[in-house]
Amino acid sequence: MKILIALLAATSLHAQILPGTKPLEPNPDFSATMVAGIDKMALRLIEQSKAGRKPTREKLKAAIGIVDERVPFTALELVGDTASPALLHETEQCRVFRVRWPVFDGVYGEGLYVQPKAKPHARVIYLPDADGTPEKLVDEWLLTTGCEVVIPALVSRGSEFSTNDKYGVKTNCSHREWIYRQSYELGRHLIGYEVQKALSIVDWFKAQPAQVPLLIAGIGEGGMQVLHAAAIDERIDSVYSMGYFAPRESVWQEPIERNVFGLLRDLGDAEIASLIAPRPLVLQHLFYPNRVVSMEAAKGARSIAAPGRLSAPDLAAFEAEVARAKQIAPTSRILAATQETNNDQIIRHLLPQASADAALKSLKITGATITIKPDATRQKRLVRELEAFTQRLLVTTEMERKAQFWDKLPLKSLPEYKTHTAKERDRFWNEVIGRLPDPNLPMNAKSRFVRETDKVAIYEVTLDVWDDVFAWGWLCLPKDLKEGEKRPVVVCQHGLEGIPEDTITIDETNRAFGAYKAFTLRLAEQGFVTFAPHNPYRGMHAFRTLQRKLNPLGLTLYSVINGQHQRILEWLKAQPFAIPEKIAFYGLSYGGKSAMRTPAVLTDYCLSICSGDFNEWVRKCVSTDMPMNYTHTHEYEIWEWNMGRTFNYAEMAALIAPRPFMVERGHNDGVGIDEWVNYEFAKVRRLYNKLLIGDRTTIEHFDGPHTIHGVGTYQFLKEKLGWK
């Protein structure tokens, strides 16, 4: 009786706390405090990552999405017509052509080809920065070295083509971010695409009958690609990287197209350089791009670009990273070059003596100006080819998921199914979501009475999870709880920029009420115990940069959220009012996103309801054919690495099975269209039917917008939780 009195006697005792908890001091913004704590943990994990990195070529290839076979070719194609001939420039020593070469189906590398008229002293692949062009790299020095040179063009940082042409609406998103947005979800990356274009030239050069040293060089973004290419491909003899090498622990501050999942877990710049050893490597502290990604958009254009900036590291930081590379690989042959380092010294470091002597002897610098007009149409081709290739992957990756997931499911018995999907659940959590260690602090539960209605008492609760990270939520207890009575619990999850109170307020003038309809409170009024946790997707850039900090560690925001929910479940299961095996999850919008990712890995949730989010998720993230897709919006944290090749929403629902699963869908909900939602849910329905548990899943359509409907879902909860 004492427990019951303690739970329900808070009507006039503002300081009342829940049994087994300590007093909770009010906080004006628990949400901001939570986000700041997670940020602190993420930065700490980034710093700690340096000690545990174990670089390999295979890890680097996987991280930058090198999964597609390159198209073999025997000759460069000349690009020209009667108005613009392919031959751009000719001297006594060489010719310069505009060329292209196949890389993937429908994707070409393009650039310039410097063809010496005598046998080359060396072969060179020379990549400009993304703000440069191949034509700008052609000077008298380059043309008189006697080297055979291919200069690939990179996707630029312009934004002219970062949109679907049929809309006629421009964006402020760079071409590089535009391709990143489409490829990341599919396990590809712009970095990988451009490295593949360079490696195609390596393939061609190495197929030539007369072999000479092969050097790869680059500036800025090109300096990044050459490091990656040489670390992956040992056929490259030497490397010259300018304007890129630096400590990479702040990669989350750089333009988002440099975001590489798992990079810092295994590979900083020093580790990548170590994979080049013992081949000669020049790292030059010069020519770093200086750029701030503007959040402003031109009039009439969409502002969707992710914030980021590029600048040169200070010399001491550069030298410290070089020292780390040498320590990791004692056989390294690294020349750390500065403005004072002369070209002769660099050439002699990169090339064998005979080749270096011949190249230096060939130099005949007269000071003549070389001017070649850039190709005005090339950039659009580069962008549209990669876009078309990536969009076609929506079909092939679905077939991958079928072969790797659906075709392997055992459907004849539930025990066999559960054993099989336990392994898939681990794969999803470890490789896609990213798994942190289980909560390791004492729970340290704290609570305080907030307010009450005639039927419900409401408490605020916090629970410690990891250093600097806690869980927070509002608990609603029905006042008709009897002594010793245990009831089902429904965890009610808010959406983007929400807080727990949003799911409880009954103020119809409050915008939150329009979305949530006080579903946490309404379910408590119907007799359920309810808990509204806070998920830390609040604070615009404050939380979105959490994803940027976690991704290079092979983690996501849901790595943290799932750990918080582990602790929440642990606490709820131990409460005297809860039936431990009857704790359900019900979330709207970003909370619906949570309803797919959290119960899929945490089996203590006995059922899940996804409201206002269930979708053909991969298509929504990748496709460019509808304005609602994330390629056209400002949610730059939304993409999850390689999801398209592994787990779409139907696959996540399969990890929830055989537990009950429901979708709540408003016909007018702009997060998707019925056709996409129904297409994806059909896979779920078929699975449950084949497992002979078709009564455990359903979808309710209602004629409404992005909101809790609370009709079929309430009935589903009562039925599946056995509550009348």
Image (cartoon, rainbow, N blue to C red):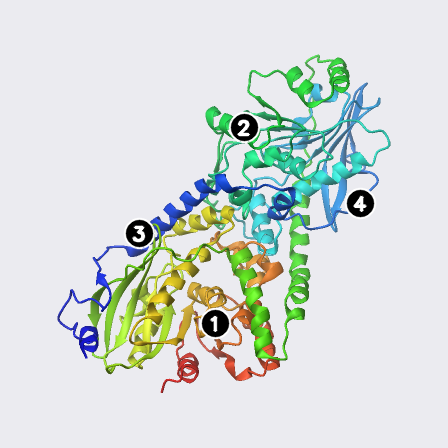
The local secondary structure at tag 1 comes to loop
Instruction: Provide the residue designation for mark 4.
Output: 72
Return the mark for residue 128. Answer: none
User: Label 1 sits on what residue type?
Assistant: Asn
Q: Which mark is residue 668?
A: 1
Q: Nearer the viewer, mark 1 or mark 4?
A: 4
The answer to whether residue 377 of the structure is visible from this angle is no
Q: Which residue is mark 3?
A: 33
Q: CA distance from mark 2 to mark 1?
A: 56 Å
User: Mark 3 vs mark 1: which is more N-terminal?
Assistant: 3
Q: Amino acid at mark 4?
A: Pro
Q: Residue at x 51, y 81 (%)?
A: 696
| The one of 231 and 304 positioned closer to us in this rendering | 231
Q: Residues within 10 Å of mark 1 (few under 14, many from 20)?
A: some
Q: Nearer the viewer, mark 4 or mark 3?
A: 3
- Image-quadrant location for residue 621: bottom right
Q: Relative to residue 335, is residue 100 drawn left or right?
A: right
Can you tell which mark lies on residue 322? Answer: 2
> Spatial distance from mark 1 to mark 4, Cα to Cα?
49 Å
Q: Do residues under tags 3 and 1 come within 8 Å of each other at their CB atoms?
A: no
Location of the N terminus (image quadrant): bottom left
The tag earlier along the polypeptide, 4 or 3, is 3
Secondary element under disc 2, as helix, strand or loop, is helix
